[in-house]
Amino acid sequence: MSDNIFVCYPRCTTCKKAEKWLAEQGIAVTVRDIKEDNPTEKELRQWHEKSGLPLKRFFNTSGLKYKELGLKDKLPSMSEDEQYALLATDGMLVGFKEKEWLEKLI
């Protein structure tokens, strides 16, 4: 079992691409199905702090849930606590961007 957790939606083509990329880089991961086991608020806080990214980047702005909930307009007025709580309910996490992953992981 690896210490690196790869949280993904197994049927997502972007997730498959990211998992393949990790394997090609020799990075061992433990796969965690986001539909079965959402990240907790505590995990999200830790990942956010380590990432150096703005919290907004943890939302899948192309996702259906993001659009259904009108988050484009709501996020700016939400507190960080509210955003973490929302992320923990559905796991609408940041997607795979190879260049950014290279900078953070390699």
Image: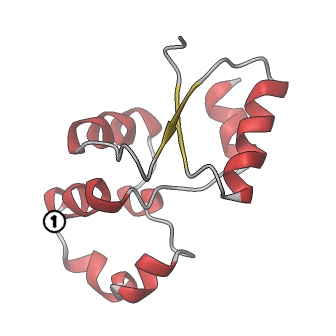
Q: Which quadrant does the C terminus fall into?
A: top right
Left or right relative to 44: residue 54? right
Residue 18 falls in image quadrant: top right
Of residues 57 and 16, the one drawn nearer to the viewer in this rendering: 16
Residue 101 falls in image quadrant: top right
Q: Is residue 6 above or below residue 34?
A: above
The mark tally for this picture is 1
Position of residue 69 measured from the top left corner of the image (x, y, whole percent) = 33, 85
Position of residue 103 measured from the top left corner of the image (x, y, whole percent) = 68, 34
Residue placed at 40% from the left, 47% from the top?
36
In the image, what residue type sits under mark 1?
Ser
Residue 92 falls in image quadrant: bottom left
Left or right relative to 76: residue 78? left
Which residue in the structure is indicated by mark 1? 79
Residue placed at 30% from the left, 36% from the top?
43
Coloring applied to the structure: secondary structure
Position of residue 19 measured from the top left corner of the image (x, y, whole percent) = 71, 37
Position of residue 95 measured from the top left corner of the image (x, y, whole percent) = 60, 56
Q: Is residue 52 above or below residue 27?
A: below
State the SS at label 1.
loop
Extreme residue toward the right, this view:
24
Extreme residue toward the top, this view:
1
Residue placed at 53% from the left, 11% from the top?
1
* Crowd rating for badge 1 (residues with CA inside 10 Å; few <14, some 14–19, many 20+): few
Residue placed at 49% from the left, 14% from the top?
3
